[in-house]
Amino acid sequence: ATLEPELYHRSAGLFRDRPPASQAECQLTDADVAAAGGWASLLGERQRCLCVPVPHETGWLRSELAQRDRLEESELASLCAGLSVADSEVSDGAGKPTQAKKARLAGDGVHSWNGDSVELLVYADECGLKVHDLVETIAILSVGPVPSSDAPDDENTEQQQDPDAPPPPSVFRLHSLSHRRLANQVLGSFVPAASGLLEAEDKQPEEEQQDDPQWSFLRNALLGVFTDALHGDSLAAEYLLLHLISAVYLRGLDDPTPDDNSAVSAGLVAVGKLSLNLTCCRAQLVRHVARLLDLLVPRLCRLPLSLGCLNSGQLTPKLDCDTCRLRPGLLQMPAHTQLVLDETALEAGRLSETGLANVRALSRLVSRQAVEFDLQMYRKDFASDLRVLVVSEGKSVLPCDVLLPLEAKNFVSQAAAEKDFNLLLEKVTLDAPFLREARRYLAGAGQLAADSGAYEIGAEQQAWIEADFVRRRQAARSKENADEIINNSAGDDEAEGATAEDLALRLVLCRLLTISLGRRRPTRAIWDRVARMEAERKRRILMASKNAPA
């Protein structure tokens, strides 16, 4: 039997990257099959994945990864110091490659990698990789020209020998020996001993339980930095911190009715996401927030939502039928990438068909954490997990989870704000220990938020959450029956959070706030704190709507 392109010989390790040129090629006899115990044990299926470099890595992460690579190369060189090297590969006694070998490694113009993509070949029945996954692999590099399956071998040989013929395209393949999915790229991100914290909380009464001291210190320090960057708005700083550690930990089906804009027959619900829309902001604040987050998060993409960007950009991938390859889209990013959408750049004008499609793609990303792939014959959603922060002057056109008008308490002028922010940024940049620990804190808290088992609600907590929700529902119905209008008078907080959507949001906020404090279970104080945050946020929304021009 002839080995097909996706099959390989388990014991001998034989494989082919293309169909054989003749039936006699890669032929296995019946005796070989019988000796191996049958086809199931003799042949395995090779999984192919197309991998690209990690996009939108911040400068500090690239520096850390480069430093780690140099350290690993130094350790590898010390381990290989006693090994002998073939004389044909060295130019002197120091074990350095010859100039010809260096040229082949660096690329001779024919087999040079352009940094676009490589094929990852996993020799296993299941590779465990999904779209948008980060993967780390130890592999053997295979570089060579792409063979033409249409032309016979003698014609390919003649073309290669012709000096005037253009160089054939190269294909880069990584034959994986071992690979793993990466939860995050932050080196040394720490997570408190979750099991130990849970055992301690079980043994102590609720009023005696304390937050993790190290996490509390870092959390308060980050809140102080965010408050200064947001012109003294401590509430916005609190929501921004919870947004930075949010992660999808559960997915399910929502509405079984088909969606008009997709071929998917059921809505996808992403539980745990917290998209944030900061309003009443200028373009200057967008730059400040992006520069600050660039020092803290491993991957960041700032996208100005101008008419030119929306009408000409390609946000979602699309299949190119001529090359049978996907043209990449900007929204193809690894999980937990920070996406800052700048709506202050949006001006009056008309959106083209491409612009409308891009707005729908952003809306789908914010509401469902899904990126739509256009495969020409049909469209398919692939799960994503991006932290979307929208900064705008008014309410965003995108359906964000949290709408928060900014209240600048210490804003004097743009010049003074620029000076104060530069001083803040210089102070944070010079404090290397704080930056290192803050990055580890955000990465560790985000890793916990993505773990469905890192947070628990006991029977006691569930009881007082349900009682609180029932009380608020009754207060809201009493107001409706009395034809009262919700205002800022005393007692109106009882009617807040009376809908199912409000309850779902409060549960997400309570979970993130609990995790940010280094806890496994919420307390009544944490739940009440979330209630006060939501009450203040809705008060701001009401005041902003009253002050908005007619």
Image (tube, helix red, strand yellow):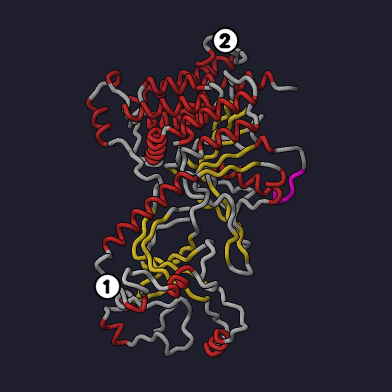
Density class for disc 1 (Cα within 10 Å; few <14, some 14-19, many ≥20) is: few
Pinpoint residue 469: horizontal percent, then vertical percent: 45, 23
Judge whether 92 appears above or below 22 on screen.
above
Q: Nearer the viewer, residue 107 or 454?
A: 107
Residue 201 image label: none
Residue 104 visible in the current orientation: yes
Q: Residue at x 66, y 22 (%)?
A: 545
Q: Secondary structure at mark 2?
A: loop
Q: Residue at x 60, y 12 (%)?
A: 482
Q: Residue at x 51, y 28 (%)?
A: 424
Pinpoint residue 472: horizontal percent, then vertical percent: 49, 19
Q: Secondary structure at mark 1?
A: loop
**Amino acid tagged 1:** Ser
Residue 489 image label: 2
Q: Nearer the viewer, residue 433 or 350?
A: 433
Residue behind mark 1: 84
Q: What quarter of the picture does the N terminus occupy?
A: bottom left
Pinpoint residue 60: horizontal percent, then vertical percent: 46, 44
Residue 449 visible in the current orientation: no
Pinpoint residue 445: horizontal percent, then vertical percent: 39, 36
Judge whether 12 appears above or below 439 on screen.
below
**Amino acid tagged 2:** Ser
Q: Nearer the viewer, residue 434 or 200?
A: 434
